[in-house]
Image (tube, rainbow, N blue to C red):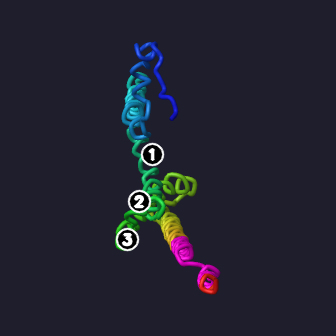
């Protein structure tokens, strides 16, 4: 038998290794969610507070900053909606509860409305200002085909993703069946071995 490992006198007395500080012990074995709860959330809140204090301390026009922030939010909303629609239809992310067809039928108009409003505002503030006589109707006429293009692209993306997922699932099931079924050589070799034992 292997000799039992004996602890050194220093380790037995508690002098083997210096104790880790509390800040280091907090991160030992911590997951990404634990790190986000301890450090990431506080850092994000501090950044938001600092960004909110900069215009106030610099005495910048508050109304203009609020309007600019709302415009940026309106332009980012269709991007977030489109990415969220693509993510909930990704089988790798939503393998446990994939998005249903009825759910897509309810979510797709929301994405389309967000894109239509964003394209309308964007075209009205850019193209309609460059062309004299153009207004809201021309902006909506520009926004409509852009919105249809985005919605069609999302539908094609979801369709191709589902086809790839279905083909991968069929291939995985076929591979599992091939691994579970005995091969033809083994089924032929077993009776031969039995006959050889009987002849001996």
Q: CA distance from mark 2 to mark 1?
A: 13 Å
**Left-right relation of 64 to 168:** left
Q: Which residue is located at x 45 percent, y 55 percent?
A: 121
Circle 1 sits on which residue?
Answer: 72
Q: Residues within 10 Å of mark 1 (few under 14, many from 20)?
A: few
Circle 2/circle 1 CB separation < 8 Å? no
**Left-right relation of 66 to 86:** left
Q: Which residues are magenta?
A: 167-194
Q: Which residue is located at x 39 percent, y 67 percent?
A: 99
Which one is earlier in the sequence, the residue at label 2 or at label 1?
A: 1
Q: Nearer the viewer, residue 53 or 88?
A: 88
Circle 2 sits on which residue?
Answer: 114
Instruction: Kindly state the secondary structure of the residue where label 1 is placed.
Output: helix
Q: Nearer the viewer, residue 198 or 90?
A: 198
Q: Residue furthest front?
A: 200
Circle 3 sits on which residue?
Answer: 100
Q: Position of residue 89 (x, y in %)?
A: 45, 65
Q: Which mark is residue 82?
A: none
């Amino acid at each position: 038998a292997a000799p039992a490992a004996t602890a050194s006198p220093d380790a037995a007395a508690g002098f083997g290794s210096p104790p880790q500080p509390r800040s280091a012990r907090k991160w030992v074995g911590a997951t990404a969610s634990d790190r986000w709860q301890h450090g990431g959330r506080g850092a994000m809140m501090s950044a938001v507070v600092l960004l909110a204090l900069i215009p106030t301390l610099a005495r910048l026009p508050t109304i203009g900053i609020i309007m600019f922030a709302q415009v940026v939010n309106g332009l980012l909303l269709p991007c977030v909606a489109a990415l969220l629609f693509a993510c909930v239809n990704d089988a790798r992310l939503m393998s446990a509860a994939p998005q249903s067809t009825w759910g897509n039928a309810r979510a797709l108009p929301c994405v389309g409305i967000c894109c239509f409003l964003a394209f309308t505002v964007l075209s009205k503030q850019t193209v309609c200002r460059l062309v004299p006589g153009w207004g809201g109707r021309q902006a909506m006429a520009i926004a409509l085909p852009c919105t249809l293009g985005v919605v069609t692209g999302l539908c094609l993306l979801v369709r191709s993703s589902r086809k790839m997922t279905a083909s991968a699932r069929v291939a995985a099931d076929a591979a599992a069946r091939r691994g579970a079924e005995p091969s033809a050589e083994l089924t032929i070799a077993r009776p031969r071995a039995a006959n050889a034992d009987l002849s001996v």
